[in-house]
Image (cartoon, rainbow, N blue to C red):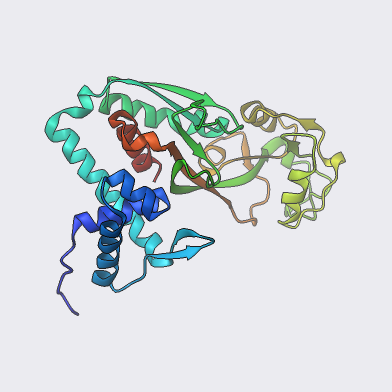
Amino acid sequence: MDRRSINFDWNRARAFLVTAEEGSLSAAARALAMTQPTLSRQVAALEQELGVSLFERVGGRLSLTTSGVELLTHVQAMGQAANNLSLSASGRAEAIEGDVCISASEAVAAFVLPSIVEKLRLHAPGVRVEIIASNDSSDLLRREADIAIRAYQPTELELIARRVADIDVHLYAAKSYLAKWPQPRTIQSLADAKFLAFDKNDELINELAKLGFSLKQSNFPAVVSNHLVQWELVKQGVGIGFMLEQVGDSEPLVERAFPSLAAIPTQSWLVVHRELNTSRRLRMVYDFLAEQLS
């Protein structure tokens, strides 16, 4: 095996990282306060060093190649490590103060964020966190929140997005409810079962149809927009509903309604305004969240 190591240049890696986060060479060059040709040369030099293509142009925008996506994960970890080292060496985490507003879905805000916020409080006690728990997306451009955790990649050029670990979702029901239905439980055997909807339109019916379900509005006796209230209804045996795997699997009152059905992977994106590049407070919290959510 060839044990020769690559002479890795962090400046080139940082140029790649910021370009990936900004989505264009021009925006990355502005963020790094360098000329676009200089930035392009650094990215090209990194590609030559590694012997792979990191970007391709899709519809006038830069898109990561498969190799670029794989490298991004490692470079993000390097960037976080470098930031933590700097904060630790200078005590800046202690010195950073102020408010940061984080927006997330109701389930993520209730079941994922609390432990992360507690760790953040110990890491940077001067930062005060406000959480918006809503299934509606906060408008970061209008500063409704500083940072958002979303299930989709934003398209606004003014926003920076980093994909973090996907969240697995399953359909759950109370054990008492499932005991009423024939075994083994399948999509066909529970064709007349009751499900819980978030609204009155057919969007959920259409999404479940992709998984093999053939449901009608009559399968949905309750409509509850609040996910936490809906989860309580699931636990009380009203019907079948969605929940994060880590929450549903640990709840003793429920079980997966369809054990043979694979998890439904839900994308998770950490989104922030470009002010990230000029705010030490936002950068620290954003990087901390990215590390914890990954």
Q: How many discs mark residues in the rendered view?
A: 0
Res 293 quadrant in image: top left
Give the answer, above or below, for where 116 lies relative to 15.
above
Residue at horizontal 43 percent and vertical 52 percent from the top: 23
Horizontal and vertical percent for residue 11? 21, 54
Horizontal and vertical percent for residue 261? 65, 55
**Is residue 107 or residue 258 the one in the foreground?**
107
Residue at horizontal 50 percent and vertical 32 percent from the top: 141
Residue at horizontal 20 percent and vertical 55 percent from the top: 10
Residue at horizontal 25 percent and vertical 58 percent from the top: 38
Give the answer, above or below, for where 135 lies relative to 5.
above
Residue extending furthest toward the left: 89
The quadrant of the rendering that contains the N terminus is bottom left
Q: Is residue 48 left or right of residue 110?
A: left
Horizontal and vertical percent for residue 244? 56, 41
**Is residue 56 or residue 192 the one in the foreground?**
56
Res 85 quadrant in image: top left
Give the answer, above or below, for where 234 lies relative to 55.
above
Horizontal and vertical percent for residue 176? 71, 35
